[in-house]
Image (cartoon, rainbow, N blue to C red):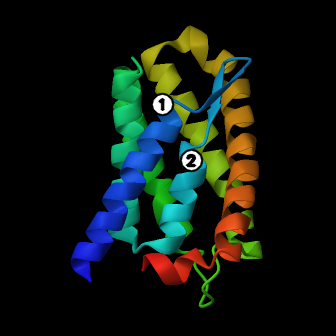
Amino acid sequence: MKIKKLTVSGMFAALIFVTTMFVKIPVVSGYIHFGDALLYIAALILDAPYAIAAGVIGESLADLAGGYAMYMPATAIIKFIIALIFTFSKTDSKKILSKKSVLMTVPAAIITVGGYFVADLIIDKSYAIVDISGNVIQTVGSAVIFIIIAAALDKMKIFDKII
């Protein structure tokens, strides 16, 4: 079972990387990507250490490959916390989408916006305020994408097929 969890975690890390790096919808300051939505899903399917690894590796590598290496430490911390809190919202049912998981997108948004605000204050103070709007748009977009993908995966009964 451990090999299966490692494999699924690696798959999620790759999917998170690809959907963060290459599936982008441009917005005012930055872009919306699907990586966060897949991080939420990974955290609702996998145990905490595997979900955290998938999120931190996938999102941090996207920062590196995308020319944002200076954000890697912040991304690693932010995605670690988000994956952890999403694992706490798991229910006993084999559903990804629940009221609890949808509500978890709110603290995820607060952590993302606040975390990158602090990172921007350290990296480039002049950009910190400007970046807030892009991060808010990203988090709302991630929540919507999460709900759509999670609903589709629940209809496919993916939980039974993956783990």
Looking at the rendered image, the quarter that the C terminus falls into is bottom left
Q: Nearer the viewer, residue 154 or 142?
A: 154
Q: Name the residue under label 1.
A: 21
Estimate the x, y position of residue 102 in percent, counting from the top left: 73, 65
Estimate the x, y position of residue 65 in percent, counting from the top left: 35, 24
Horizontal side of 77 relative to 32 (left or right) equals left
Callout 1 crowding tier (Cα within 10 Å): few <14, some 14–19, many ≥20: many
**Residue visible at 53% across and 13% down in the picture:** 125
**Residue visible at 44% across and 21% down in the picture:** 122
**Of the residues shown, which amino acid type is indicated by label 1?**
Met
Mark 1 vs mark 2, CA separation in Å: 11 Å
Estimate the x, y position of residue 156 in percent, counting from the top left: 65, 74
Estimate the x, y position of residue 126 in percent, counting from the top left: 58, 9
Q: Mark 2 points at which residue?
A: 36
Q: Which of 99 and 14 is in front in this view?
A: 14
Q: Does dot 2 land on a helix, a strand or a loop?
A: helix
Q: Is residue 85 visible?
A: no
- Asked which quadrant contains residue 113, the reply is top right
